[in-house]
Image: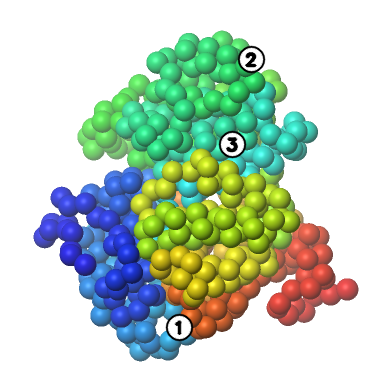
Amino acid sequence: MTEEINEDGMNEVIRAPRGTELHCRGWGQEAALRLIRNNLDPEVAMDPKNLIVYGGRGKAARNWESFREIQNMLRELYNDETLLIQSGKPVGAFKTSKWAPRVLIVNSQLVPKWATDDIFWELERKGLTMFGQMTAGSWIYIGTQGILQGTYETLAALARKEFGQDSLKGKWVLSSGLGEMGGAQPLAITMNDGVGIIVEVDPEKIERRLRTRYLDVLASDLEEAITLKNNALKEGKALSIGLLGNAASVYYDLKKRNEIPDVVTDQTAAHDIEVGYIPEGLSVKEAESLRKRDRDAYLKRVYQSIVKEVETILWFKDHGSKVFDYGNNLRTRAREGGFQDAFRIQGYVPAYIRDIFAVGSGPFRWVALSGNPDDIYRIDDAIIREFHYNEPLVRWIKLAKERVKFQGLPARICYADYGTREKIGLLINDMVKKKEIDAPVAIGRDHHDTGSVASPYRETEGMRDGSDAIADWPILNALLNASSGATWVSVHHGGGTGIGNSIHSGFVLVADGTDEAREKIRTVLNSDPGIGVIRHADAGYEASRSLIRKGVKFKVPYFEP
């Protein structure tokens, strides 16, 4: 492979290699090499020149020197060695075993008393740490598709629970944020047959969503957005409408017009208070200028805008809208800004997703290392054929195949529960073995999953037993995956809801068609969702306990018949 970055690492395009030629000593190392580069593909990453992948300032590597050295060490790494990554920086490699992970990654960890925004970002400025978000620093980000099904499932569950219908047909959704995560919202809304107005302050992000077909149209102003919304509702068609503007301003203008949405949320990057939420009255460039010139004045305006938006969301709630916090820490920021009622807005996990997590389900994914889209389509077809009895799974795969545009290496996201993940993994490995697809496949997931995260403002908000802040589970998850044969394992801090608010872990497992990969799939894809079932059973969820009583491939001291 020809190195594609120059000495300063900032001016060349980074892309993953394609095809079957190895540039490392094994497919495990090769997968890590391809996927860290894929994270910085301009089709995938938010700001690749600064190594930022998504989620405010979530990075793939600490700096360009670290990025180069990670690649160099991966190329030289043997199949019985393990590379250590300390907050985006390679620090050593040890002889371990073929069954051990090829890479162990730990990002952004701080002693709890020191885990504040001010301390963390000062250490980051000194070059001592890195914010890895969730899948940015663990090298398994697949673009906006990675959050798409989660958003789709959230809205589908909302439709069933709040409106007693199987879709959002005849309903309209107001939200904001078209970044790397929020950009999934418009397509998730229309996949659920709804109409959406999505507010975004950055015109480049709107253009990106139009280009990748996540967003249908751009309205010239609020008046046109309302007209387009009303016409779509009248005609009974799904439509996503982008609107250039500030969320606090647009929400308030809709309130003044007495335009009450059916559903209201927000997916700006408010968790990163420095760069993730642009205050009223400023463009993105003006906000950057003020932030550099007078940080305190800038943050004051950010908090004022967030409070205004949250107050308006609650006005919508009081007038009939179904509102929820989509896990970006908006409520906490509003409370920090002096608005004490922010938590009258419910979190989306306890409201709509907890039942899915309880049975070991969550955002499973796989990436075609060949770069050939047909590899993903062949896997799609095999899943549709082999899982024909699983109507929700088949429906999603058909929808995704039809409507999702790949970013970077072709990939697929799929919510799959305990038992199903292992079956899918074995199916993929068998297809590689039979050469039905061109090259091995990297299997992984988001950290936002059933048993891999402690995040009291998102995934573990409102746990039945009060264990919201217990962070043993993501650490156990990482240790278990490392022991079970994962190709690489990561433990991060602060993803999703910001520094001090979450601990979470992830894994990637390479299906290369070998018998060894088959055995690792049997262990990892049993262990990883299995600990999620245990975590929820331990917290008192009957769906988890019932699943255990029906029969699982792990032992438990409780919950037996």
**Amino acid marked by disc 1:** Ala
> CA–CA distance between discs 1 and 2?
58 Å
In the rendered structure, the answer to whether residue 267 lies left or right of residue 154 reads left
- Count neighbours of disc 2 (C-alpha within 10 A) and say few if under 14, some if 14 to 19, many if 20 or more: few
* Secondary-structure class at tag 3: helix
In the rendered structure, the answer to whether residue 458 lies left or right of residue 439 reads right
Tell me the tag on residue 100: 1
Tell me the tag on residue 191: 3
Residue at 45 percent across and 65 percent down: it is 437
Tell me the tag on residue 234: 2
Identify the image quadrant of the C terminus: bottom right
Q: Earlier in the sequence, mark 1 or mark 2?
A: 1
Residue 546 drawn at (x, y percent): 82, 65
Q: Foreground mark, 3 or 1?
A: 3
Residue 384 appears in the figure: yes
**Amino acid marked by disc 3:** Met
